[in-house]
Amino acid sequence: MHFLRIFIFIFLLSCEDNFQEIQNINSKNILPIGITENLKLIYTDSAKVKAILYSDLNKDFTNQSFPYSEFPEGVKITFYDNDLNETIVTSDYAITYNKTNIVNLIGNVVINNFDGSELKTKQLYWDPEQEWLFTEEKFSFKNIDYDIIASRLDANRSFTIFNTGKLDGKVLVEDN
């Protein structure tokens, strides 16, 4: 019996803790297919510049099963309309999902439109195909007719269609 106790004691002492090694074997290292620093991407249509995207860092994960591209140090995008008017969008972080074509802007999101209007929020989704913006976060919007703070936004890019949740602020209303 004494021999059995010594054998079990030696056996227990000889065991290693391989838990971290097992975790490393089972984990997938998600590595980008490419990394770009100081990115300047120019989008054109019919030989006209439509947008310019600037970012200090871009990580391309289009090698994943749900491909995406992230901008961990933020973005600045300048959009141009047909009259070359500029709309500037900035955020601290951005991610684009290739399969859904949705852009998620996060952190200090600001849209400065050429007409002087300004939208600020913590987070904003953008669908470039539909030219549609939406968020469930609190936001502020100012222009000639509005100075509002609201929760939830559902709007087109030019803010001519503008749906919100609970609203607080000033709105100019025309009486017919």
Image (cartoon, helix red, strand yellow):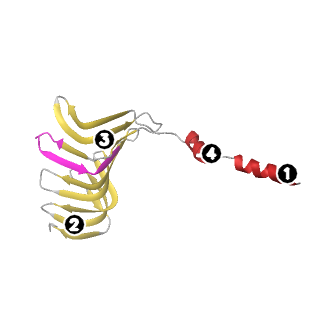
Residue 60 place in picture, x, y as percent: 36, 36
Please state the extent of the stretch shown in magenta in the rendering: 79-95
- Residue nearer the viewer, 94 or 81: 94
Query: Is residue 49 shown to the viewer in this render?
Result: yes
- Secondary structure, magenta segment, majority class: strand
Between the C-alphas of marks 3 and 2, the distance is 27 Å
Between the C-alphas of marks 1 and 2, the distance is 79 Å
**Disc 1 target residue:** 4
Whichever of labels 3 and 2 marks the residue nearer the N terminus, that label is 3
**Disc 4 target residue:** 18
Between disc 4 and disc 2, the foreground one is 4
Q: Quadrant of the N terminus?
A: bottom right
Q: Identify the residue at image location x=12%, y=53%.
A: 115
Whichever of labels 4 and 2 marks the residue nearer the N terminus, that label is 4
Residue 79 place in picture, x, y as percent: 19, 43
- Residue nearer the viewer, 10 or 117: 10
Residue 148: assigned label = 2
Question: Is residue 2 rendered to the left or right of residue 121?
Answer: right
Q: Secondary structure at mark 1?
A: helix
Q: Identify the residue at image location x=12%, y=55%.
A: 116
